């Protein structure tokens, strides 16, 4: 089994004050869970946090970028956004973003259960 990349460990440490962090290999990156709620993906050396219609404006206002990928020649948008650069240097500065991601993930989970 390959070791967890240093950047993924760094991201987990940034999120740790918000809850119990678990990492999981996925596709071409990593998934991060807080208290078993899927809140983030790491692709290469970029952390993307879960956002939704309610929290997306905050990510946009902070200069965040949406994770996109190409599938069958078409660009696909996701609900994952980058955080401000300073949040990548400090667990304290990451916490508001982590809370937004958890809230978005819980809203998404609740919405899918209602269907």
Image (cartoon, rainbow, N blue to C red):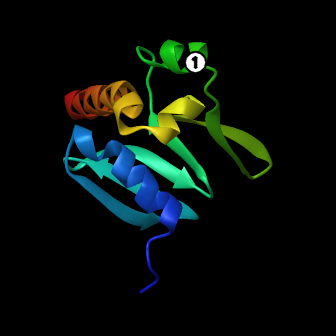
Percent across and percent down for residue 12 are 37, 53
Is residue 60 toward the left or the right of residue 19 in the image? right
* Residue at 52% across, 13% down: 57
User: What is the number of callouts on the image?
Assistant: 1
Tell me residue 47's x, y (percent): 53, 45
Does 88 appear above or below 42?
A: above
Q: Which image quadrant: the N terminus? A: bottom left
Q: Secondary structure at mark 1?
A: loop
Mark 1 Cα shell of 10 Å, populated few (<14), some (14-19), many (≥20): few
Above or below, 85 relative to 36 = above
Please tell me in which quadrant of the rendered image residue 31 appears. bottom left
Write down the residue under mark 1: 62
Quarter of the figure with the C terminus = top left
Q: Is residue 83 visible?
A: no
36 or 114: nearer the eye?
Answer: 36
Q: Residue at x 44, y 28 (%)?
A: 51
Q: Nearer the viewer, residue 85 or 114?
A: 85
Q: In this view of the protein, can residue 76 be seen by the observer? A: yes
**Residue in the image at 26% along x and 35% along y:** 109
- Left or right, 111 with reference to 48: left
Residue 112: image location, x then y, percent: 28, 33
Q: Residue furthest right?
A: 73
Residue furthest out toward the bottom: 1
Query: x%, y% of residue 87?
Result: 48, 33
Q: Residue at x 24, y 38 (%)?
A: 18
Q: Is residue 105 left or right of residue 41?
A: left
């Amino acid at each position: 089994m390959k070791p967890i990349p240093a950047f993924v460990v760094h991201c987990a440490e940034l999120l740790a004050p918000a809850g119990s962090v678990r990492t999981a290999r996925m596709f071409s990156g990593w998934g991060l869970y807080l208290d078993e709620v899927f809140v983030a993906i790491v692709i290469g050396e970029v952390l993307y946090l879960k956002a939704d219609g309610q929290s997306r404006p905050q990510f946009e206002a902070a200069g965040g970028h949406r994770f996109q990928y190409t599938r069958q020649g078409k660009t696909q948008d996701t609900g994952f956004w980058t955080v401000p650069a300073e949040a990548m240097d400090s667990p304290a500065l990451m916490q508001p973003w982590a809370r937004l991601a958890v809230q978005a993930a819980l809203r998404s989970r609740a919405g899918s259960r209602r269907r």
